[in-house]
């Protein structure tokens, strides 16, 4: 089984308010926020944009999550360096981490077990 494209982009920011306004000015709608410096945006039927505020002393990063329909049915090709197998997340999905040939980490995300 292969991945099904990009599921989400996880973006770290040092200023939640400015970043939220920036993406809203580009047409993204805030779909969910708990008021804790994080939220989920979406522009139409596009991928999810998950923004999380981090402390000033950390360098902001970005992570791209590729979509997987079924974690139990997914078998990584031997050419794929699996860093962590699928694990349940606190936000209701299952996630695997893989490393590309240049050392970048990628997240593979599947629906959580019901």
Image: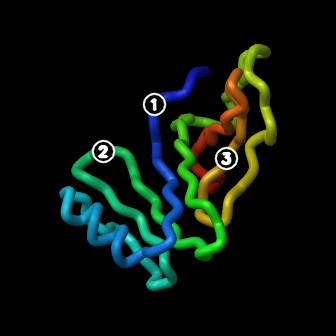
Task: Report the label total.
Answer: 3
Q: On the picture, is 77 further left or further right than 55? A: right
- Label 3 and label 1: CA atoms lie apart by 15 Å
Work out whether 1 lies above or below 60: above
Work out whether 6 lies above or below 49: above
The reply to whether discs 1 and 2 touch (Cβ–Cβ < 8 Å) is no
What SS does tag 2 mark?
Answer: loop
The residue that label 1 is drawn on is 5
Residue depicted at 62% across the width and 56% down the height? 114
**Residue 5 quadrant:** top left
Q: How is the image coloured?
A: rainbow
Mark 1 or mark 2, earlier in chain? 1
Mark 3 or mark 1, earlier in chain? 1
The reply to whether discs 3 and 2 touch (Cβ–Cβ < 8 Å) is no
Residue 112, position as x, y percentages in the image = 62, 52
Residue 105, position as x, y percentages in the image = 68, 38
Relative depth, front residue between 73 and 49: 49
- Label 1 and label 2: CA atoms lie apart by 11 Å
Residue depicted at 61% across the width and 21% down the height? 1
Relative depth, front residue between 59 and 29: 59
Q: Residue furthest bottom?
A: 35
Residue depicted at 24% across the width and 65% down the height? 24
- Label 3 and label 2: CA atoms lie apart by 20 Å
The residue that label 2 is drawn on is 46
Q: On the picture, is 82 further left or further right than 111? A: right
The residue that label 3 is drawn on is 95
What SS does tag 1 mark?
Answer: loop
Classify mark 2: residues with Cα within 10 Å, few (<14), some (14-19) or many (20+).
Answer: few
Residue depicted at 70% across the width and 21% down the height? 101
Q: Residue furthest front?
A: 57
Classify mark 3: residues with Cα within 10 Å, few (<14), some (14-19) or many (20+).
Answer: many
Relative depth, front residue between 26 and 3: 26
């Amino acid at each position: 089984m292969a991945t099904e494209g990009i599921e989400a982009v996880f973006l770290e920011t040092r200023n939640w308010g400015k970043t939220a306004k920036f993406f809203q000015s580009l047409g993204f709608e805030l779909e969910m926020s708990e008021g804790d410096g994080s939220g989920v945006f979406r522009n139409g039927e596009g991928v999810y944009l998950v923004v999380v505020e981090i402390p000033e002393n950390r360098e902001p990063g970005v992570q791209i999550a590729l979509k997987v329909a079924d974690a139990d049915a997914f078998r990584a090709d031997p050419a794929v360096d699996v860093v962590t197998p699928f694990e349940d997340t606190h936000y209701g999905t299952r996630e695997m981490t893989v490393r590309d040939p240049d050392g970048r980490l990628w997240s593979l995300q599947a629906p959580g077990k019901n």
